[in-house]
Image (tube, coloured by chain):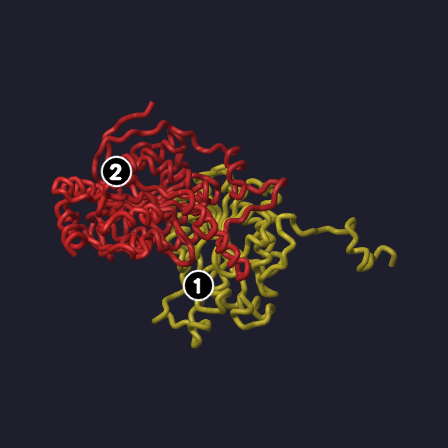
Chain colours: A red, B yellow
Amino acid sequence: MKELRLMKGNEAVAEAAIRAGCDGYFGYPITPQSEIMEYLMAQQPEKTTGMVVLQAESEVAAINMVYGGASCGKRVMTSSSSPGISLKQEGISYIAGAELPCVIVNVVRGGPGLGTIQPSQSDYFQSVKGGGHGDYRLIVLAPASVQEMADFAGLGFDLAFKYRNPVLILSDGVIGQMMEKVELDEFKPRFTKEEIAKNTPWATFGKTDDRERNIITSLDLDSAKQEKHVTHLSEKYKLMEENEVRFEEFQTEDAEYLIVAYGSSARISQKAVDIARAKGIKVGLLRPITLFPFPKKPLAELAKQVKGILSVEMSLGQMVEDVKLAVECKVKVEHFGRYGGIIPTPDEVVAALEQKIIGG
Amino acid sequence: MSDIITKEQIRQPENLVYSKTKLLTDKALSYCPGCGHGTAHRIVMEVIEELSAQSETIGIAPVGCSVLAYEFMNIDMQQAAHGRAPALATAVKRLMPEKYVFTYQGDGDLAAIGTAETIHACNRGENITIIFINNGIYGMTGGQMAPTTLPNMKASTCPYGRDVATMGNPLKITELIAQLPGVHYVTRQAVHTPGNVRKTKKAVRKAFDLQKENKGLTFVEIVSNCNSGWKMTPVQSNKWMEENMFPFYPLGDIKVDGQLIK
């Protein structure tokens, strides 16, 4: 039986992680996501599921604790907000290079620098184009509701282990802080030692006589081998693009115009679609749920049908570049955004649609 | 004369009194001839073999000369980002408390870029063992100044000697972490003579035994030479170490049973 609760997005992802059989959470406080660790500490899951919760001395230490735990085949996670996620980038690069599964939550606030503690979506480039050094990709899930904050904890771990790759839940201050009804999954047991040995035979859980030692590293001084390794990574990313694209369409069947938006911008844009339709404008919404892999094909299909596309983001315009690439400039694509912690209203989105796409 | 065995006979298996531990791989060490790392590796692996703990031990390699420690240590190992080994070890031990967990780190890794991770893992009293190789220089990158480089000692980034007025004093991080309540056992040893090797091995064994008893963090510093980085022959470097490093970094126990040695 699923359990219904009224929760903040930050609390929902924390509770869902416990229920998804998470073995360890390692974090450092930062607004607007501190409720994640506060909730976990209050729940004391070490007394129920045995999950470890540890407040690290820095975001840098926390992501490296994730590296250590993931290397043991454990389900581990961390969370932070924009400036803290920047600090974690070195560790994320190592985790991607060493092919370790883990879940990272970014409850985005406005930047650059210390910026603001209000919501933003200005970490898109950092999330989908790399962030740290080297050729790598994260699987990026963008929740648009408290329910999805909960759902993506379990989904995140599943995808992370399926591909031996870090999964980023790219949320924002709106989704993290708002309260909504959420249906929680039943408790899933943590991996047993036997399951770890069977499912993650590459992990470091102690060398036995029946196998060679396991080594977790992102280092290869032999460039030919390193090139082979990066090629292997690229093949993995190709598989993700083939199999893991997730998106949602809203009123696109007869749409003459299209809005593309993710996360809280998608919630605002959904309302904007209703307002515009009441005015007689046939507009639909495509909401990418995975930002990497990006829903290129459905966008390319819709580009054949619509006269123009508006990318709505709480940033100066980052995802808009991927929208343009997906539709290969065959249709007009414009960006509308508020930023620095300001949230656009549905009316502003409709006005931007009218000015930049319909009238422009 | 018949009781004196020949060179050929010595090499016969039945006459061997010592053999390499199975916990070291056959891979040729990447360390410079004369360097103390190889001996330090051997000591740690011999201790794990004596404890029959190959399947019960996870090691964390740093960035620095011993970045490739996992090539030589025949146990499950993780290679950490520069300075972060104690963070990895923290998670490994918390998630698998039944295992022996150790980090093997040099002075740049442990006492410069990783200072925060070192101090906080020590302060939390993680039940891990830190093996700290202090040779007062960045060996791998070609002999730059380390946090433990002695005053007036020359390195490639202090070619006229370390000027403490502008470059700071050498950091005695071992004495520093010994102050923390979470730290149970701290000792400083060397591996340049057979006697010192025996003492170091005892210290490493003690550290692992205390870890099994969940006593808190155990810390073994090994003051070592870097003949390449110091631009000396191995013999000269060991003499220089005795005359210059040991007065600044005196050998012996610093904290035993949670009590500082006065």
Q: Amino acid at mark 2?
A: Ser
Considering only vertical position in the picture, is B27 above or below A185?
Answer: below
Q: Crowding at label 1, few (<14), some or many (≥20) Cα neighbours within 10 Å?
A: many
**Which element carries disc 1, helix, strand or loop?**
loop
Give the residue number, with chain letter if any, for mark 2.
A145
The x, y position of residue B236, in whole percent, is 58, 71
**Which element carries disc 2, helix, strand or loop?**
loop
Of residue A271 and residue A93, the one placed in the foreground of this image is A271
- Inter-mark Cα distance, 1 to 2: 52 Å
The x, y position of residue A319, in whole percent, is 28, 53
**Residue B262 in view, yes or no:** no
Considering every residue shown, the one lying at the far bottom of the view is: B160
Of residue B196 and residue B99, the one placed in the foreground of this image is B99
Name the quadrant of the C terminus of chain A.
bottom left
Q: Residue at x 23, y 53 (%)?
A: A315
Q: Amino acid at mark 1?
A: Thr
Considering only vertical position in the picture, is A201 above or below B177?
Answer: above
The x, y position of residue B220, in whole percent, is 50, 52
Considering every residue shown, the one lying at the far right of the view is: B2
Q: Crowding at label 2, few (<14), some or many (≥20) Cα neighbours within 10 Å?
A: many
Task: Indicate left or right for A215 with B177 as reference.
Answer: right
Name the quadrant of the N terminus of chain A.
top left
Of badges 1 and 2, nearer the viewer stands: 2
The x, y position of residue A110, in whole percent, is 22, 52
The circle on residue B148 is 1
Q: Numbered disc 2: what chain?
A: A
**Residue A60 in view, yes or no:** yes
Task: Indicate left or right for B77 with B111 as reference.
Answer: right
- Quarter of image, res B115: bottom left
Q: Numbered disc 1: what chain?
A: B
Q: Residue at x 23, y 52 (%)?
A: A308
